[in-house]
Amino acid sequence: MKIYVAGHRGMVGGAILRRLEARGTDTLVTRTSAELDLTDQAAVRAFFREERPDAVILAAARVGGIQANNTYPAQFIHENLMIECNVIHEAYASGVTRLLQLGSSCIYPKEAPQPMAEDALLTGTLEPTNEPYAIAKIAGIKLCESYNRQYGVDYRSVMPTNLYGPGDNFHPENSHVLPALIRRFHEAAREGREEVVIWGTGTPRREFLHVDDMAEASLFVMDLDQATYARETRPMLSHINVGTGSDVTIRELAETVARVTGYEGRLSFDTTKPDGTMRKLMDVSRLARLGWTASIGLEEGIRGTYDWFLEQDAESLRAK
Ligand SMILES: NC(=O)C1=CN([C@@H]2O[C@H](COP(=O)(O)OP(=O)(O)OC[C@H]3O[C@@H](n4cnc5c(N)ncnc54)[C@H](OP(=O)(O)O)[C@@H]3O)[C@@H](O)[C@H]2O)C=CC1
Ligand SMILES: C[C@H]1O[C@H](OP(=O)(O)OP(=O)(O)OC[C@H]2O[C@@H](n3cnc4c(=O)[nH]c(N)nc43)[C@H](O)[C@@H]2O)[C@@H](O)[C@@H](O)C1=O
């Protein structure tokens, strides 16, 4: 098959590309955002007409942590809607019958029963810090469902929990919590600082999945036969959660990162920063029933990510 991996320089797209390359069975097509801006419909149409891939993995998106979502809500909703509309529609228009797109656990209501099952979608109000991004991600699910129903294509959606790993964004303000803490604790340990500040109260719980597990799960879902995917996601041919099924508090996460980076000072909590959702644990029983479960433990995964971080030069981390 000829597979277009959109977002191949990102953390998730990169991990998926590595896995596909290792498999060696497909022809892989990639473009950077500089080569193909997926918010540009005419450019996306021309790309699909020229390349005519058989399948698409959509891992390109405007992505960021709680503060980035809060600071740039217009970009988060606009770019993500445009990317999804352009890629999904132009894929369909050029004859692509198989597509996998990535959403996020923030699609579920702020007060959803825990763990959050797939059918909690659209049952309540979203978390305000990432509502624009979540609305775009929900639109992605509905685009796939609708194209499946009307046009008989096979467009699938996976909803990952919070991800981390090699290739992550370590920006001090705009990143997600785990890379932010790895960087902050690393710098504090190196400079012998006595205090590290953690945003919020430290009491929210988060579930963290290693990106290599995510890449494996993505291809697992992509490879399911159509009848199995349809059976599990009926009646709307909707989406499948991907996670580990267990979570930790942000304080526990910080303690683990401190251990891994060798930081021995105090932790303090800046409660002027938002906590966001207090808990968003995925119900991963649908995927488990199909035969996939995560295998990389959190501390093991953080150690590997820290090793990767140490191998990067400051320039390449800043460029992310
Ligand atoms: N990271 C996480 O914790 C989570 C991520 N997800 C989802 O997983 C997917 C991948 O996220 P992740 O790998 O972390 O994100 P990254 O920010 O690491 O990568 C995103 C990629 O998208 C590409 N991209 C962004 N905008 C455009 C554009 N306008 N045109 C073309 N390409 C564009 C970028 O390409 P380039 O490098 O060429 O500029 C970049 O490589 C997203 O859908 C995200 O919502 C879901 C849950 C959690
Ligand atoms: C994947 C997911 O990611 C985002 O949602 P989030 O889960 O709230 O993401 P986060 O990783 O930024 O924060 C998790 C928790 O950690 C706390 N926290 C402590 N200290 C730092 C810190 O230094 N940086 C960050 N970013 N958070 C920190 C922070 O206050 C919060 O309580 C959305 O983009 C959403 O749309 C989405 O899909």
Image (spheres, helix red, strand yellow):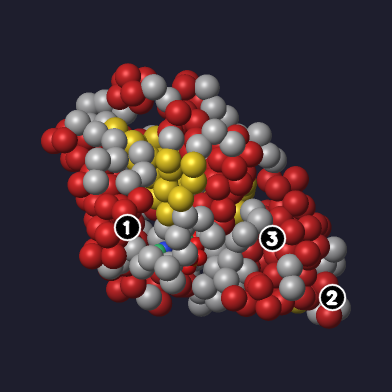
Label 3: state its secondary structure. helix
From this view, report whether residue 131 is shown above or below residue 113: below
| Mark toward the start of the polypeptide (3 vs 1) | 1
Q: Nearer the viewer, mark 2 or mark 1?
A: 1
Disc 3 crowd, CA 10 A, few/some/many (<14, 14-19, 20+): many
Label 1: state its secondary structure. helix
Q: Tell me which amino acid carries mark 3.
A: Ala
Q: Quadrant of the N terminus?
A: top left
CA separation, marks 3 and 2?
A: 17 Å
What's the residue at 84%, 67% (across, down)?
A: 264
Q: Tell me which amino acid carries mark 1.
A: Phe
* 77 to the left or right of 216: left
Disc 1 crowd, CA 10 A, few/some/many (<14, 14-19, 20+): some
| Mark toward the start of the polypeptide (2 vs 1) | 1
What's the residue at 63%, 39% (across, down)?
A: 22
Q: x and y percent of residue 276 in the render?
A: 45, 62
Residue receiving disc 3: 254
Spot the residue most to the left. Answer: 150
Labelled disc at residue 47: 1
Label 2: state its secondary structure. helix
Q: Nearer the viewer, residue 129 or 267?
A: 129
CA separation, marks 2 and 1?
A: 47 Å
| Mark toward the start of the polypeptide (3 vs 2) | 2
The quarter of the displayed image where residue 16 is located: top right
Residue receiving disc 2: 190
What's the residue at 62%, 59% (across, down)?
A: 167
Labelled disc at residue 258: none
What's the residue at 53%, 59% (across, down)?
A: 10
Q: Tell me which amino acid carries mark 2.
A: Arg
Spot the residue most to the front. Answer: 50
Disc 2 crowd, CA 10 A, few/some/many (<14, 14-19, 20+): few
Q: Are marks 2 and 1 in contact (CB under 8 Å)?
A: no
